[in-house]
Image (cartoon, grey):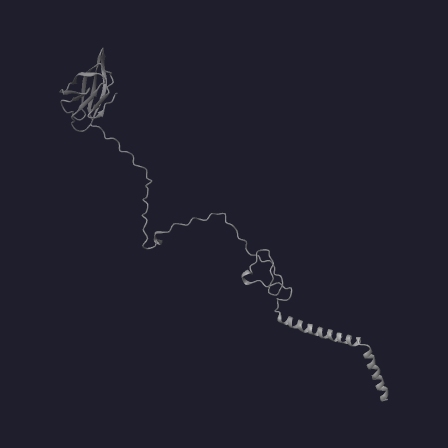
Amino acid sequence: MSGTGQGARHRHGRAVASSPWIVVFAGVVVMVVLLVIVLGTYRGRSDAEVPRGLEVGAPMPTPPWLSASPTGSASADSTGGTRTPSSSPTPTLSSTPSAPASPPSPSSVLPGSPSVPASPRVSTAPPAPPAPPAQPELTGRYRVTSTFSGGFIAEVQVSNVSGAGQEWQVRLGFSGGRVTTAWVMNAPQGRLRENDDVYTYSGGADLAPGQSARLMFHVERAETRPAECAVNGVTCGGL
C-alpha cells in the first residue's frame, strides 16, 4: 500500500517538474490577487481622507469674499451641487443731477482762519423821484409891441408871485443889435447898464406881492427874438 502511494507521489512530482508553466501561472494568479487587495485598501483610505465636497471631479468651493456672483451666473455650493442664479440688485443710474455742495456756514469756519466780510446787500427799491423845482419868486414874459424900419419896441412884464416884496432885475441880450433906451410904465424908473452886448436893467422900486411892472425898451439892428432874456436868473416866457 505504501509502495503504491510513494509511486503516485513520485509520478506527481515528475509531472510538476516536467510542467514548469503551471508554477508560473500559479504565481501570476497569486500576484494579481494581492494587487487587487492592495488597490482596494488604498482606495478605501483615499475616500476616507478626502473631505466631503472635494471628491474627484467636484468643483472647488467659492471663497466667502467671492460668494456674491453677478446676476444670472451659477455657482457651486459646499456640497458640490449647483446653486440657482442669485438675483442681486442691478445698479441704476439717476438722471437727476446732484445738487452742488453748499458753501460752509460761518459757524463751521475753523478758529484762527481769516474771516471773510459779508458782501453788502444791494437795495432793489426804485430811486426816489426828483424833487420838483422850486417855485420862482419873480416871473417875466417877453413880447414885441411894435416894429419899424431898423428896429422895434418890446417889453418884459415882471410879476411878483411870492408872498413878500422883491427886488427885480432884467437881463437882455441881442445878437448884433443894441438897446438904445429902456423905461418902466407907471412905476419908478431904474437904471440900464451894458456889458459885452448884454444889457441889465435894475428896477427902481421893489415889487409888492402880486404886483407887476412893464419894462419897455427900444432895440436897433437886431432880431426880434433875443439871445437872452431872464428876470432874477429865471428865463422869460413867451420866447
Expressed as whole percent of the image width and height from the top left, the position of residue 22 reads 80, 76
Given residues 75 and 38, the one toward you in this image is: 38
Of the 4 image quadrants, the one containing the N terminus is bottom right
Relative to residue 14, is residue 213 drawn left or right?
left
* Relative height, residue 144 to residue 60 (above, below): above
Expressed as whole percent of the image width and height from the top left, the position of residue 54 reads 62, 66
Image point (77%, 75%), residue name: 24
Image point (19%, 22%), residue name: 171
Image point (64%, 73%), residue name: 45
Given residues 194 and 217, the one toward you in this image is: 194
Relative to residue 98, is residue 124 drawn left or right?
left
* Relative height, residue 181 to residue 73 (above, below): above
Image point (64%, 71%), residue name: 46
Rendered image quadrant of residue 193: top left
Rendered image quadrant of residue 40: bottom right
Expressed as whole percent of the image width and height from the top left, the position of residue 48 reads 63, 72
